[in-house]
């Protein structure tokens, strides 16, 4: 039945290096060699100066909660065992923002400005999904 399993990421030619990084335990983003612009998600060109092929770099995986919400009602049956869970917008130290689940954190204790670190959760297709957990 639809919704009984969690959806898997749709990998495209542009996002493939990102998902390969996740499977290898690396959080990847891009930095333009021409202008220094940091961007995420991966694209074939720099969104500031239009230079092609921004370099793919590895994040140290540490950041700060920019904002968050708590999900109390599962969007599909596959998420029933997860509620309540936290979705956070995380500003990584290199200068890019990523949305992820905030694991190992009670919903009542999440705070804007909280430090977090990336963890990778295995997916059914052999890949991995980046999530974050509280970290000093
Ligand atoms: Zn650029």
Image (spheres, rainbow, N blue to C red):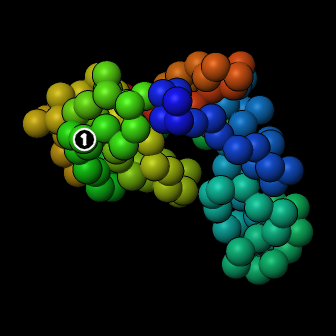
Residue 87 on image: x %, y %: 34, 44
Residue at the outermost left position: 108
Residue 20 on image: x %, y %: 77, 32
Crowding near the residue tagged with mark 1, few <14, some 14–19, many ≥20 C-alpha atoms within 10 Å? few
What residue sits 64% from the left and 19% below the top? 124
What residue sits 22% from the left and 33% below the top? 84
Residue matched to label 1: 73
Answer with the quarter of the image where residue 114 lies: top left
Residue 119 on image: x %, y %: 49, 25
* Number of numbered labels in the structure image: 1
* Quarter of the rendered image showing ligand 1: bottom right
Question: On the rendered image, what quadrant is the C terminus found in?
Answer: top left
Horizontal relation, residue 78 to residue 58: left or right: left
Residue at the outermost bottom position: 49
**Residue at disc 1, CB closer than 8 Å to ligand 1:** no
Which of 44 and 80 lies nearest the eye of the viewer?
80
Which of 113 and 42 lies nearest the eye of the viewer?
42
Residue 92 on image: x %, y %: 48, 48
Which of 51 and 40 lies nearest the eye of the viewer?
40
Quick one: SS at disc 1? loop
């Amino acid at each position: 039945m639809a919704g009984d399993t969690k959806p898997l990421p749709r990998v495209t030619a542009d996002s493939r290096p990102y998902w390969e990084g996740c499977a290898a335990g690396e959080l990847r983003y891009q930095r333009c060699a021409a202008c220094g612009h940091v961007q995420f998600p991966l694209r074939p060109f720099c969104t500031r100066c239009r230079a092609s092929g921004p370099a793919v770099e590895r994040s140290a995986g540490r950041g700060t909660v920019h904002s968050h919400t708590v999900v109390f009602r599962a969007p599909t049956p596959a998420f029933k065992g997860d509620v309540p869970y936290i979705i956070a917008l995380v500003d990584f130290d290199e200068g890019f923002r990523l949305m992820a689940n905030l694991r190992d954190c009670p919903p009542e204790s999440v705070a804007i400005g909280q430090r977090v670190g990336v963890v990778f959760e295995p997916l059914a297709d052999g890949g991995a999904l980046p999530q974050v957990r509280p970290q000093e």
